[in-house]
Image (tube, helix red, strand yellow):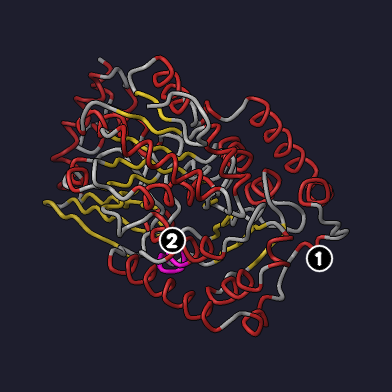
Amino acid sequence: MTEAGGSALRVLAAGSSAGRERLEHLGRRGRGGIEAEIRQAAAEIVDRVRAGGDAALLEAVRRFDGYEAGTMGLLRLDDQGTARLSVESAVLAAIEHARGAIEAYHRALLRGPGVERVDRGGVRIEERRIAIRRVGLYVPGGRFPYPSTVLMTAVPARLAGVEEIVVATPPQAYRDSPVLRHVLDLVGVDEVWGMGGAHAVAALAYGTESIRAVDLIAGPGNAWVAAAKQHVAADVGIDRDAGPSEVVIVATAGAPAECVAADLLAQAEHDPLAVAVLVTDSAELAESVGREVDSRLADLPTAETAVAALERYGVAFVVADLDEAIALAERIAPEHLQLMGEAAEERAGEVRNAGAVFVGASSPVVFGDYVAGPSHVLPTGGSARFASGLGTDDFLRRSHTVRFSAEAAAAWAGAAETLATTEGLSAHAAAAALRRGSDGRETRR
């Protein structure tokens, strides 16, 4: 087993000092893992746009997106209606297949806007599910356009009943991709703005003279986007820390090395900060996967990005047994967890800490990226310990209405008064006492 050497995917014994150091490094990849310089710079960009409005946003677009819009009218993008004419028929068919799968999945689980009631002896509680009115969707595009992200975010938003969907995406991605423009038209977004990065998050969160602020920002992004979303989270809803892509593959002997390698690289090519990790109880498999990764990198167009990601977060951990492998994966709490090899696949039901689980060599994460149905916007940075993937529920808020009859109020007032008195809240107790026929002043005697 090589702990250092020529392979782009280093192979480490999980219990070695180098293995423990690598695991600790992975554990710092969340909010604390965003470099302090990026967090500070993203916050400064957000604050400039918040204070400076249109002028500051146009300057940020010029500086960071490389787009000399000049006026806000040129930043508003609305020529997607004719894009279909430029898209190959096979791509159009694939988009329809993907949209159908995404809509079918979310529709089957939908609890849309509505009212549910609970009645108990003169007490009626109504819980209303209310669609968020105006939602901003961030669609990455710094390296490649991502029409799939439009499908994965806008489809559940529409099903939930969102009235206004606003998309922010880098202007170059919009101009270069008729597929992206077609999908934006297909799902019926209301506004498209050519802006990416922290300044786009700022404009969505706080608005400018020309852009109305949204109520919720959803969608994945790089470290700058994640840092900006964290910075604005006190003022606008954010979906989750959907940062750079992550995969942990738990594989046992017999898993196909070529599939493991291909799936690691499929995530590594997303971003230099992407996470691609193998955990296995087979040193032989780890070495085979390392060789396969090197072979595939030789002619991979995105090799530069993938190699950078593997250098930063990539590793093949070799562990003593499958129990240790599952425990290590749970500790990382990845966005995507793949289980390969018969023994590993049998353990799928035990997994708690993963944004999504893919079982077997026939179920790669790439299917989740495009055609499985659930949204590919998933918790990253270890937040899979407590967060979930994007769904229709994220675009709904709950609000309850309470009605007590006079008789029920009298019946329940004593308990409320007693609890309020126990907590030392005299005005609370007095307000409750009034509902049982007392003037409430006796509670202060």
Placement of 354 over or under 16, stated as above or below: below
397 sits to left or right of 401? right
Tell me the quadrant of the picture where the C terminus can be found.
Answer: top left
Q: Residue type at mark 1?
A: Gly
| Image position, residue 267 (x, y; %) | 48, 48
Res. 195 image quadrant? bottom right
- Residue stretch rendered in magenta on the structure: 155-160
Placement of 426 over or under 137, stated as above or below: above
Whether residue 54 is visible: no
- Alpha-carbon span between mark 2 and mark 1: 29 Å
Q: Main secondary structure of the magenta part?
A: helix
Residue 58 or 294: which is nearer the viewer? 294
Residue 324 or 354: which is nearer the viewer? 324
Question: What residue is at 19 percent from the left and 25 percent from the top?
Answer: 418
207 sits to left or right of 397? right
Label 2 neighbour load within 10 Å: few <14, some 14-19, many 20+: many
- The residue labelled by disc 1 is 73
Res. 278 image quadrant? top left
- The residue labelled by disc 2 is 131
Question: What residue is at 35 percent from the left and 58 percent from the top?
Answer: 129
Determine the residue located farthest toward the right in the rendered image.
70
